Amino acid sequence: MKQNAEQALGTSVSAALVSLLLVAGCNAGAASPSPSEGGGDPAAYTVIATTSVFADLAQLALGDSVTIETIIPAGVDVHTFEPSPADAQRLAGADLIIMNGLGLDEWALSLLEAAGKSEDEVLELGEGIDESHAWIYLEGEAHDEDGGAGHEHGGTDPHIWLDPQGAAIYVERIAARVAADLPGLAMQIEGARDAGLAEIAALDEELRVGFSAVDSTKRKIVTFHDAFGYFARAYEVEIVGVAVEAPGQEPSAKEIAALIDAIDGAGVTSVFSEVQFPSKVLDQIAAETGATVLEDLFSDALGDAPADSYLGAMRSNASAIVASFR
């Protein structure tokens, strides 16, 4: 679940970011004031999200009221993405930067520093969820650099949006923040938010009906990496095991053997890769268990249609998983 993206940046990007501090600082100084500060055109307000998933959730929250962009394009995973100095230059002109936090996209912090952005200009969707929503958090494993599992998540699984109720929290937070920045658009944003929340609620109900039609004893899956805990909890699916703890990490022979035993014991007939992560490990496991490898799931990134939106990706995931139970 937790690839060390900071290691992936490499020394070349680090050096480039150092030089960019001066460039971005100049850009930031010359930038037009945001609508919240200078009364400018609200259409000029720009939200930049770290991933395609969060950009689409921002679309559900805000509709067409502002400009929404993403750093990581669809089809590229947040764990293995290598940002460039050009990404920091883009951030310098943003009014709001949306990231997940909880260790998922910490590489963005270097970009934010290079772009001269303050904490007030950043919304970390997964961080600091208030007590009324604290139930959403799932505890995960924290791994340091020596452990080789990548991001340090502080013990909290960051993939909150894979439960539609978690995605709804994100939409509410985005809408509230931008409405506060653009009070003149508050009613328009409220309408977009309500429509987005209704779509997410309909998705959740649709998925619950689909999963409830399957005997609970058959709701068992094996996934490529440890990203689907929230999804599994929402729809009472048992995750028998994962092939790797984080993208880019190879399991030991002992871990592979343990997973094969778990698959055989649970009677799992399908194992899921993720679209952006072909896995020789899963092929090996499938060969030894007779299971079928299905490369259908979307977690940290969107894909091609119909999975080019949050709603579409979630429906694609559910359809593939439910079909594997039969």
Image (spheres, helix red, strand yellow):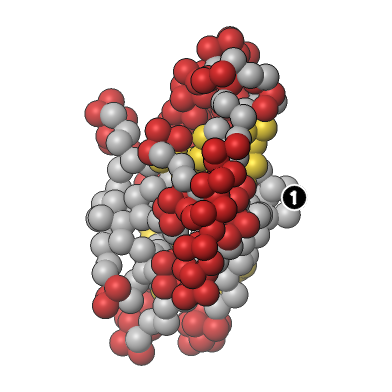
Would you place residue 178 above or below residue 315 in this image? above
Question: What residue is at 74 percent from the left and 50 percent from the top?
Answer: 305
Front residue of this view, candidates 260 and 213: 260
Q: Position of residue 137 (x, y in %)?
A: 30, 43
Would you place residue 48 above or below residue 268 in this image? above
Image quarter where the C terminus lies is: bottom right
Residue at far right of view: 305
Q: Position of residue 26 (x, y in %)?
A: 56, 45
Question: What residue is at 36 percent from the left and 89 percent from the top?
Answer: 253
Q: Position of residue 263 (x, y in %)?
A: 40, 74
The answer to whether 140 appears left or right of 294 in the picture is: left
Q: Amino acid at mark 1?
A: Ala
Q: How many marks?
A: 1
Q: In this rendering, does residue 258 appear at all?
A: yes
Image quarter where the N terminus lies is: bottom left
Snapshot quadrant of residue 61: top right
Question: What residue is at 49 percent from the left and 55 percent from the top?
Answer: 21
Front residue of this view, candidates 106 and 75: 106
Front residue of this view, candidates 215 and 221: 221
Q: Identify the residue position indicated by label 1 in the image.
A: 305
Q: Position of residue 160 (x, y in %)?
A: 41, 44
Residue at far bottom of view: 253
Question: What residue is at 73 percent from the left and 54 percent from the top?
Answer: 304
